[in-house]
Amino acid sequence: MSSTAPPPVDLGKGSAGDERLLAVSPLRKLLGRPELGSVVGAVAVFVFFSVVADDFLQTSSLSTVLYAASTIGIMAVPVALLMIGGEFDLSAGVLVTTSALVSSMFSYQMTANVWVGVFVSLLVTLAVGAFNGMLLTLTKLPSFIITLGTFLMLTGLNLGFTKLITGRVSTDSISDMQGFDSAKKLFASELVIGDVTLKVTVLWWFGLVAVATWILLRTRFGNWIYAVGGNPDAARAVGVPVVRTRIGLYLGVAFAAWISGQHLLFSYDVVQSGEGVGNELIYIIAAVIGGCLITGGYGSAIGSAVGALIFGMTSKGIVYAEWNPDWFKFFLGAMLLLAALLNAWVRKRAEATR
Amino acid sequence: MARARTGVRAVGALLAAVLGASLVGCSSTGGKRAADARKAQAEAVGKAAVSTPRWTFAMVTHSGEGDTFWDIVQKGAKEASAKDNINFLYSKSDEGQQQAQLVQAAIDKKVDGLIVTLAKPDAMKDVVKKAVAAGIPVITINSGSAQSKEYGALTHIGQDETVAGEAVGTELNQRGKKKAVCVLHEQGNVGHEQRCSGAAKTFEGEMQNLYVDGTNMPDVQASIEAKLQTDKAIDAVVTLGAPFADTAVRAKETARSKAEIDTFDLNPKVAAGLKSGALGFAVDQQPYLQGYEAVDLLWLYRYNADMLGGGLPVLTGPQIVTQDQAAQLEDYTKRGTR
């Protein structure tokens, strides 16, 4: 900034000469939030199902919806961060299953305390995340291709190893082993508050959203994520550690996959090796409905949570409304397009009024 | 404007042409008209035959998208519901976690009866017990005969997959087969594994498993072709689902193999194939019965506290179907009830 002020431009309120120091009205601030479009959408979906489905507004139904949303939401948070950083992870869906399988089979085969398996599973999952991030850095290939490869390899490993180790396509039961009950408390318990049953995954989900939001808005690493996603070359030029940021993001996805996988294991005690395929797209859908841009550099963690909530409300709302489930995917697709259009429109409006 | 109008005119002319062509160029065979005529002949669904209150029954299955088998199960359930004055709800998911959530949603709705499949028994354990605890009568169908009682279900209706597989092995022996391939189209499906291991148990020849990707038909065909080309000694191929039998027949023709194609489950193509001799035999588990009986039994339970099975599963199969019964079954498969 030079000391001579530029000719006054009509900038609306509080024209201080530097647009970065403008006092922005709260409404403007709201319009600039990535998740605004999805919040409007979520309210619309909620009102819609409240009207068409009698049972939707019961406390028990709402806790079912929240649980459904949390199982998607836990993964949607780091996937959203990754997308803000301009990358994809198509292996996230099966990585959840991998995490559950490793944990269960390691404990069972080693006859170890269940917590040992849980810890080993964390290491393995993080290793897969690091593998994705390293490969991205080393090969310079698009992350879409790399994680597509990881996705296929993991799908095969899940089936192959399970069959090799247990002789079946699902794992052995570990519910009678030491540590199972305490691990179940952490990953798959229920809290009963009055007549509301809250699954512990909902707490994990809210916790992850809070942490991710704090990272994005209040830390240096958050700034790096936006910078790397917006323009990696420019970010590198001003000294942002691009490689470390990307690997960190993939580790984040791996960590959430570990939580989700442990939840699967301790809820159901036996893991089916073929599951998880296709969920990676649902995480991405939740992030996109929540305002993340496919091209990176824009989005929010709260948005991904709202996207997951919309997914939960739709998938269960259709059941409460007694509709034929054959139409669910159609609704999901239509909602994705509508949300993306709404987000784009809100973003344009927000930029135009700046 | 003028251009827009010619556009409208062109569309109008095109529509008229299509309509005219469809009126002139009628097909005297097949098509919807023939199907409607068949339907009119065999209309089983009518008004409710009972005067019990309108109860709501929910069915939650592990079916994937667009599965013919589950279509027939649903048909049976719907026709029984029409007779028994039942409001019938159906939902499905092939992910254990999602299926459990759907059962939870049915509990939230306070349904009067629940029908579930236990393909992923451990994922369904807690939620089925919860339904029983909430006072909802539960019947399990199709898969999970081993767990049904333990989880508190009233009875189980289905086919024991191991028994069905054993029946296939015995039938192959009778037909003098020496080397067979069992085609598994869904990796990770426990029931499929049981079918193939059951068949291998009673089959005196050599039985090999071939894993294919059931969601990708061309790939299934290529895999079976490759298998038949590499091993000319194979004289029987057993597919685990009706749609795959036809694919196996094509693969056999391309590979110029002499193998006999046999299959689990029925559909119109399988019935036609049995009739023409392209297929050896089919093992039917009568999905229509699984849906129909589940609804009817729940109705009986609510109306009269009746239950079938005496604590043992009610078996709907295996029923071996050969060329002799094919003609009769062809109509029923076209109707979508076999």
Image (cartoon, coloured by chain):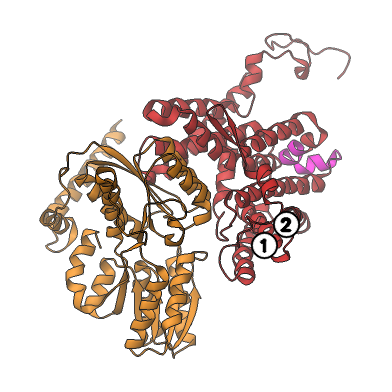
Q: How many marks?
A: 2
Q: Secondary structure at mark 2?
A: helix
Magenta segment:
A225-240
Label 2 chain ID: A
Task: Compare residues A138 and A111 and report the one nearer the observer.
Answer: A111
Task: Compare residues A10 and B77 and report the one nearer the observer.
Answer: B77
Q: Residue at x 38, y 70 (%)?
A: B244
Task: Answer yes or no: is residue A90 visible.
Answer: no
Task: Compare residues B112 and A312 and report the one nearer the observer.
Answer: B112
Residue B52 x/y as whole percent: 21, 39
Residue picked out by circle 1: A105
Taking the view exactly as shown, the residue that stands out farthest to the right is: A3
Q: Colour of chain A?
A: red
Predominant SS of the magenta segment: helix
Figure chain in orange: B
Residue B169 x/y as whole percent: 39, 81
For the N terminus of chain A, which image quadrant?
top right
Asked whether, in this view, residue B129 is left or right of residue B242, the answer is: right
Residue picked out by circle 2: A117
Q: Is residue A229 in the magenta section?
A: yes
Residue A154 x/y as whole percent: 64, 61
Task: Compare residues A255 and A129 and report the one nearer the observer.
Answer: A255
* Residue type beneath disc 2: Gly
Alpha-carbon span between mark 1 and mark 2: 8 Å
